Amino acid sequence: MQKFIRWANVLIVLLTLMTYLAPFVSPARFWPFAFMGLIYPTLLVVNLLFVVYWGLQRQWRALLSVGVILIGWNHFLGLVGFHFGQETVEGVPKIKLMTFNVYGFDDFHQRGLPAASKELESLVYLHQPDVLCMQEFLYNRQRGPAYLEALTQHNGLTHSVWKPTEELAIFSRHPILRSEARYFGSTNGYRYADLQVGEQVIRVYNVHLRSNSITGLTNKVVDSGDLREKETWSSVGSILRNFKRAAQERASQVEELMAHLANSPYPVLVCGDFNDIPQSYTYHRIRKKLDDAFLSSGSGIGITYAGRIPGLRIDYIFTDQRFGQADLVVTRFPAGKCVFSDHRPVLQ
């Protein structure tokens, strides 16, 4: 038994090291690394269990898992934040930014039922964001007006850019000077808005990159999958194929997004549902140019996806280093609780 545990520990360490390569290899070149990055949270937990197991037995083998965690310490910080308490900067204008994939205003916990507009109103009122970016903003004549009223009349987000036929919306307390949207041939894409904040102009990007489209299949495998059944393995194959296509599309989408960001004449805030984790090529491309607000101000475990796949942080707020020069800072909040979506709102 001990021999089996030792070899299992070595295997987990090797798999963890492989996840560290995921951010540096484009899925267009070799997509399996992207999938390896997806299981990092699970591997992290298993490594911690090995540390405890060998530690209780006072064996040096605990150092294997300790070492691999330390080697990937930046990956660990991408999932766990240690910035407790709220920092303030006197005399500096602050921007409170909130991003939320609202799941089409359906109640995630009661499938097929609409979510109450009062819940959205209370959530926004609780945190009082200056700018609210929403993904999957599905407007219809029956329910849409109630959500708009919750945001504009009851929360003061009177400036907005959105279209009933699109799914990206930006609401703001500050005047919007200009806005454009770019969709990648589907509901995924990005919308930016130039905001007049005092004497400064900033550009806010609301982003929604290609979904993995594996939630339904994953739930099916978890709930009723039998590894002895051919249908189960067929579902697993479909999960891998969907993930491969999505990862490769996101790699292309993020390149276009970064090219657009490079031409911005103003400091930028970039937020939204990126459908990718900190151990991904997509995240790595953005982090080369922008700061992840969670790394500088997050606290606790930064899980933003509330579905069945555990440990995923796929919703982000990124900030431009030019904000220091423009005398603008982002006010810090912890991640919000899940209200009615399969995503948690993120606030900074």
Image: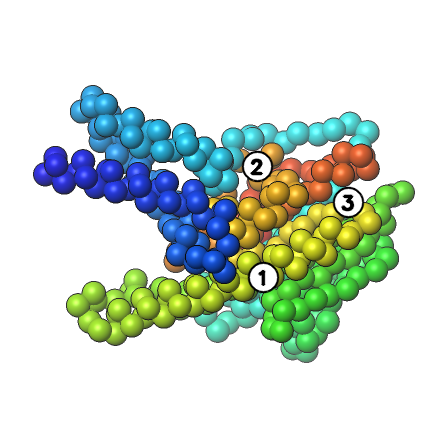
Front-lying residue, 58 or 299: 58
> Contact (CB < 8 A) between labels 1 and 3?
no
How packed is label 1: few (under 14 Cα within 10 Å), some, or many (20 or more)? some
Task: State the image quarter where residue 120 is shown.
Answer: bottom right
Q: Nearer the viewer, mark 1 or mark 2?
A: 1
Task: State the image quarter where residue 52 is shown.
Answer: top left
User: x, y (%) of residue 310?
Assistant: 39, 51
Image position of 161 with respect to 53: above or below: below
Residue at far bottom of view:
141
Can you identify the residue that label 3 sits on? Answer: 267
**Label 2 vs 3, first from the N-terminus:** 3
Can you identify the residue that label 2 sits on? Answer: 295
Residue 342 visible? The answer is no
Front-lying residue, 49 or 114: 49
Can you identify the residue that label 1 sits on? Answer: 252
**Label 1 vs 2, first from the N-terminus:** 1
Residue sitting at x 30%, y 38%: 13
User: x, y (%) of residue 118?
Assistant: 62, 60
Point out the image quarter for the N terminus.
top left
Rounded to the nearest angstrom, the CA distance separating label 2 from label 3 is 19 Å
With 98 as the anchor, is 76 left or right in this view?
left
Residue type at numbered disc 1: Ser
Question: How many numbered discs?
Answer: 3
With 332 as the anchor, is 284 left or right in this view?
left
How packed is label 3: few (under 14 Cα within 10 Å), some, or many (20 or more)? many
Q: Secondary structure at mark 3?
A: loop
Rounded to the nearest angstrom, the CA distance separating label 1 from label 2 is 25 Å
Residue type at numbered disc 3: Pro
Residue type at numbered disc 2: Leu
Residue at far top of view:
58
Residue sitting at x 85%, y 54%: 175
